[in-house]
Amino acid sequence: MIKLIQNIFKVLLIVACCFAPATLSAQDVQHNQIENEQNQVGITISNSCLRVKNAEGLVIEIFNLTGEKVYTQRIESSSKTIDLAHLQRGYYVVKIGNYTRKIYLH
C-alpha cells in the first residue's frame, strides 16, 4: 500500500512539473539561474553538469519521467556541481527540499 502511494506521488510530481512554465535546456540556457523566492535555491545547467546553489543540508533527488529515482545525494556545501553525463538525454524532475524544477538534458 505504501509503495502504491509512493508511485502515485511520483507520477503526480512528474505531471505537475511537466506543465510548469519553465524548462532549463542544457544547450539553450547554459548560465540561466532560476531561484525560488522562498528558499533561494538556485539551479544552473550547462551541458551535462548541474550546479546547485544555496541548498546546503538539503537532499537533491532526480527522477526520470517514469517516476524512477535516478540520483539522490545530500548537499553538504553551499555550492555543488553534479555530473549527469551518465543519464540519457531527455526530461528529468529535480527536487531539492521543497523546491522542484524540470530540466532537459541534451
Image: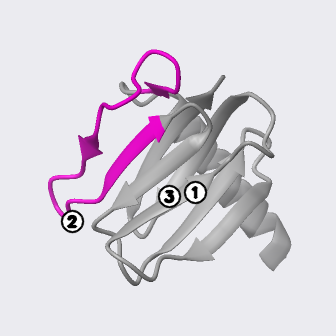
The residue located at (75%, 59%) in the rendering is: 69
Q: Is residue 93 above or below residue 104?
A: below
Q: Which residue is mark 3?
A: 81
Q: Would you identify the image quadrant in which residue 98 lies?
A: bottom left
Dot 1 crowding, Cα within 10 Å, few <14, some 14–19, many 20+: few
Residue 73, by quadrant, is: bottom right
Q: Position of residue 94 (x, y in %)?
A: 54, 51
Q: Quadrant of residue 97?
A: bottom left
Label 1 or label 2, whichever lies nearer to me, is 1
Q: Position of residue 105 (x, y in %)?
A: 63, 30
Q: Secondary structure at mark 3?
A: strand
Q: Within 10 angstroms of label 3, few (less than 14), some, or many (20 or more) residues? A: some
Name the amino acid, label 1: Ile
- The span shown in magenta is 23-45
Residue type, mark 3 in image: Thr
Quadrant including the N terminus: bottom right
What is the CA distance from the residue labelled 1 to the residue labelled 3?
4 Å
Q: Between marks 3 and 2, how big is the CA–CA gap?
A: 19 Å
In the displayed structure, 18 sits above or below 38; it is above
Q: Position of residue 106 (x, y in %)?
A: 66, 22
Name which residue type carries label 2: Asn
**Residue of label 1:** 82
First of labels 1, 2 by sequence position: 2
Looking at marks 3 and 2 on the same chain, the residue that comes earlier in the sequence is marked by: 2
Q: Dot 2: what SS? A: loop
Q: Is residue 49 magenta?
A: no
Residue of label 2: 39
Would you place residue 24 above or below residue 41 in this image? above
Does the CB distance between marks 1 and 3 fall below 8 Å? Answer: yes
